Image: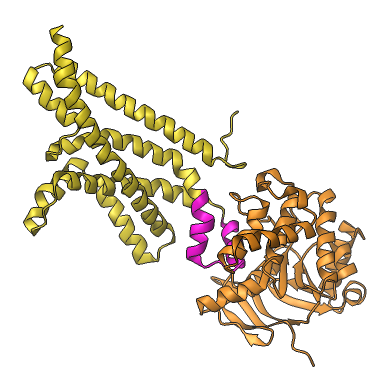
Amino acid sequence: MEEWLYISTEVYPALLKGFWVSLALIVPSALFGIAIGIVLGVLRVYGSRPVMAAADGFVALFRGIPLVVQLFVWYFGLPYLKIYLNPFTAAVLGFSLCGGAYHSEYIRGALLSIKRGQMLAAQSLGFSTTRMIVSIVLPQALRRALPGCGNELIYLIKYSSLAYMITCVELTGQGKILASNSFRYTEIFLIIGACYLVMTSAAGVLLGRLEGRLRLPGFEQYRG
Amino acid sequence: MTTPVLRIENLSKRYGSRAVLTGASFSVNKGDLKILIGPSGAGKSTLLQCINFLVQPDEGRIWLDGEEVRPGHRRALCTYRQKVGMIFQDFNLFDHLNALENVRIGLVRVKGIARDEAGERAVRELTRVGLRDHLQKYPAQLSGGQKQRVSIARALAMDPKVMLLDEPTSALDPELIGEVHSVIREMGQGGMTMIMATHQIGFARSLASEIIFMEDGRIVEQGAPDRIFCHAENARTREFCSKITELYGETR
């Protein structure tokens, strides 16, 4: 009975609050991340040489430095330059840039898989390069990149827990507070783990549906 | 004297030290069908792709309707390419679009025509190539011959002045070649100016206004079909023509 009271009056409200913060971190980070990934991916394939090198450098940087360190730089480092970000903004910025770097790699691979002939055909119809990329190449490449990008989105759901390291108290942060107050680390973190599992499973289902809706003859998966 | 629709002069292209096209010159009058023949690697594809700058020629000048093309000017190049239709050996349809959308997209995105109007035009062009019943099919659901006819409709919708056809039937089953040939024949009867690379010698002979024989990146000989096939001046032309006639016969 006492247990139940603890869960319903302390654990549940705190975790629910944390859950909403997590969701508020994940959704914009996912959208910005994909947008950054598309731009970077396109620049890394179709950009001029210096642009390509700059985009490659960007990816090397944000993929190569641990995400926690990046978050510390945004939150604790930028104030040295008189730029003050609140914990939430710093976390979204960190997740978007890091996610974008990973997305760009999936998108780059997908862009390279589009046959050159279709691009020649587009050019021969008078498409400019930009128009060709937007209307012909990206719609196909994004379909192919979707499984990889979905992977990154699911990973984002989990690494959003790092936000508590820069005092943005989301699901994991709330759990940490609850656990250190009650010393019930095992129980609390099992619940937290289950919450993430539910979120990632839901994302998996949504991504699967999206893939289904975008499926076209010629792009379907081959079942042996 | 009328101005030729298309005139090319001294078109050349090299990759490194290898010359794939050397000094190609000819002019095409309205309604002409010029046929490029020659062995693989003779430079037929390169010549066609140089004409609409899909391959950037190293040298040479091109005039369309008496006006010189300026390939360095990007917008002018896009406008020029709209007027020069191109048909590829492997169709190159846009895989994510159905037949109707394949034809419509250029009209909407390049010519800026309203979707509905462009859609009507696309249906007209697809009807013209006999695909009225396949508007909603995706490339993966069409046969080779149907795909090639969609690509012809797509090019025709842009109202080109010249069509370049790069071995349009080489990737097709013998049975499907006929349906594409009859579309090309109708285009010719409609007055379309065309330059076509092909190995279909019977078809070439029956329709061509002129045959151009190429080898090693050079135009070896050009002239009326009967002259090239029966009275070629160059020994190599005679040899190629007799070999290919033996191989592909007089099939039309």
Residue A99: x and y in percent read 31, 45
B170 is higher (above) or lower (below) than A149? below
Residue at (46%, 33%) from the top-left corner? Answer: A208
Please, what is the dominant secondary structure of the magenta stretch? helix
Residue B16: quarter of image: bottom right
Name the one closer to the observer, B211 or A164: A164
Asked whether residue A120 is drawn in magenta, I would say: yes
Residue at 22% of width from left, 36% of height from top?
A21
Q: Quick check: B193 left or right of B76?
A: right
Chain represented in yellow? A
The span shown in magenta is A116-140
Q: Which chain is orange?
A: B
Quadrant (top left, top right, bottom left, bottom right) of the C terminus of chain A: top right
Residue at 68% in and 56% down: B91
Q: Is residue B88 visible?
A: no
Does the magenta run of residues contain A148?
Answer: no
Q: Is residue B69 or residue A85 the one in the foreground?
A: A85
Task: Say how many tags the image has.
Answer: 0
In this view, B57 is above or below A148: below
* Position of residue B77 measured from the top left corner of the image (x, y, whole percent): 56, 76
Q: Is residue A196 left or right of residue B83?
A: left
Q: Is residue B66 visible?
A: yes
